Amino acid sequence: MSQLDAQGPTQDVAGAQPSATVMQTPAEPAIDAPLAGSADVMLGGGGTRRFGDRIFATAASGASAIVILIVVLVALFLLIKALPSIVDDKANFLTSTQWNVGNAGELRFGIAGLLYTTVLSSIFALLLAVPVAIGIALFITQYAPARLARPVAHAVDLLAVIPSIIYGVWGFRVLAPKLTPIQDALSHVGVGLFADQNIDVGTVFDAGLVLAIMILPIITAISRDVFDRTPTANKEGALALGATRWEMIRMTVLPFGRPGVISGAMLGLGRALGETVAVLLILSTVSGFSFSIFSGGTTFATQITQGAGEFGTHPGPYIAAGLVLFVLTFLVNAVARTIVARRKDFT
Amino acid sequence: MTSATAELRATSLSGPGRARSVKNKLAAVLVTVSFLIALVPLLWVLWTVVKDGLGTILHASWWTGTMRNVTYTDPGGGAWHAIVGTLEQVFLCTLISVPIAVMVGIYLVEYGQNAFARLTTFMVDILTGIPSIVAALFIFALMHETLHTSLSGWLVSLALVILMVPVIVRSTEEMLRLVPNDLREASYALGIAKWRTIVRVVIPTALTGLITGVVLGIARVAGETAPLLILVSVSDSTNANLFSGAQSALPTLIKKQFNDAGQTASGVSYHLDANGNRVAGAVTNYAVDRMWASALTLILIIMLLTVIARFIGRFNKLAK
């Protein structure tokens, strides 16, 4: 690979033998001539070849430039369109839980409430999904017979194929009513995080559970990947020392796969933070703000979609919410990528 | 030391002690249970959608009709207008995404390994993590707020491009890296230019894998709802024009029926019969059936795409 990349686009003939590059210049037509006779692509001579190569390389790097440009533009435009509203904000943008944006001269909005509900539902989803995902990944890589492992992996991947709006419809109309008794039982604890808010269907609890189902496939896929790459020597060494299968997993597979599981969890978290329509359909809006997981609420994404009707007159505050969501998911994903990258250095 | 050796010998001869063996069995049970836990929502969702949606989509009128002049108190209605919208928006999105994404993949694999390539990889990573709602907001801020384009279907396509490109870049990269270097070098040895080697040797070798990646990318964006909520209004009639006016798509059809399904006709004690006459009696909310039917329609389209991708993948010689 590196040998190929070291060559310039004009030095094609030299592929098999790097020392020949010196001869592959216009000054040495004797080398070119017999080749040109045998391959019709050479009829145009070195000039066209170089020209075609240059165009193709430009197109390829141009496409990369477009991707870079898109990301830069996303950050730039969100910032430009959000800043005026943040400046006009009469409330504290970071600590207020208000969202009064109807009157352009009297903007009062803050992200504290949105941030709390978004993070609470996502963390709750993560707490539910990670243990199950680790279990499934272990089942597929360490327990299931080879014939069963593939279909099982496909089944879990299918969870990722179902669109989020269908999770939302199912979550609100089918799952959430079934959860009401569990919710009632748990809310007897009664204070703070578990305070009863008299909402039967459409709580952060409901939304978090559906989010957990939605992020299960990505965490499973990445955990599966790293568990599968545990060196066989380590595993067999543990077994040879008399470890049971579980002890072998605890001593070799889990420590080896830990960074992968963490980064998978972070990617899942990023997805949960930005999930829009499933949460929009499930989560009931409440007036005021509550810390309870058995309350409704508004996340960044649902606040933005609920305000879509007001975009014509004052999209600013909503774009500001989008900007914060962008930064939040960026940070979470960056942490995940860093863990993966650092891991690569070791292996 | 001696006691440890004795213990080890005892272990290896008689198997693990009771506590360890119980722990081992418990772990096996928990791991198996966690797999079963994952199957529950999968089967539950699919079962609900099929059970409650199948009756409606078996009518031919579901596939040809629209929701024009159909309210939640009326039976019938169809999804044609939404299917048209989804197909058009996804088609335009694919048309834009595939050339860009495949060229980026080619750049990273065939030309990469410099600072620009590392920057590109980093940006693709960021794109992968962008929530669909943020992509939609960006298109809104750029196209509507700044360039004053009116809201219509093609803006949705643009937002979907942002979500689709990283998916295809990833799969393209993965597939091109599987192409054996021997093939490239054999081509260079015959004096064939690099770009012709890529177009005539590398891409054909990886083609089935590339197509699988594209189809999975299409399946990934076809169910996206957030851009539709912001970038185009909902229409109950067929609008085949991507570039102007309201246009429905399957996700927004589901959402509208979902909203209507929550309606209860309080104070209304009559409903309309097939001829439009008022008939006394409770009103049935027909939106519920259509909600599941449109969900099933969307799942069928996405499953079909996934199956096609898997089928094409079977012919992929590189993946084996």
Image (cartoon, coloured by chain):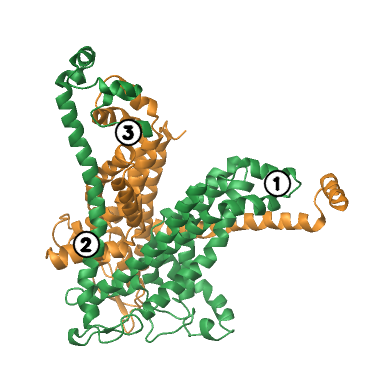
Chain colours: A green, B orange
Instruction: Identify the amino acid type marked 1.
Output: Ala
Q: What whole-number distance in Å separates the C-alpha atoms at marks 3 and 2?
A: 39 Å
Q: Earlier in the sequence, mark 3 or mark 1?
A: 3
Q: Nearer the viewer, residue B20 or A281?
A: B20
Against B113, residue B132 (above or below) is below
- Taking the image as drawn, is residue A313 in sight? yes
Q: Nearer the viewer, residue A111 or B219?
A: A111
Q: Residue at x 20, y 70 (%)?
A: A80
Element carrying mark 2: helix
Q: Residues within 10 Å of mark 2 (few under 14, many from 20)?
A: many
Against B176, residue B161 (above or below) is below
Answer with left or right where residue A230 lies relative to residue B302: right
Chain at numbered mark 1: A
| Foreground label between 3 and 2 | 3
Chain at numbered mark 3: A
User: Which residue lies under the disc numbered 3?
Assistant: A6
Instruction: Identify the amino acid type marked 2.
Output: Ile
Instruction: Identify the amino acid type marked 3.
Output: Ala
**Image position, residue B260 (x, y; %):** 32, 72
Q: What whole-number distance in Å separates the C-alpha atoms at marks 2 and 1?
A: 54 Å
Q: What whole-number distance in Å separates the C-alpha atoms at marks 3 and 1?
A: 43 Å
Q: Nearer the viewer, residue A345 or B80?
A: A345
How many labels, in total? Answer: 3
User: Which residue lies under the disc numbered 1?
Assistant: A238
User: Which residue lies under the disc numbered 2?
Assistant: B139
Answer with left or right where residue B303 lies relative to residue B88: right
| Foreground label between 3 and 1 | 3
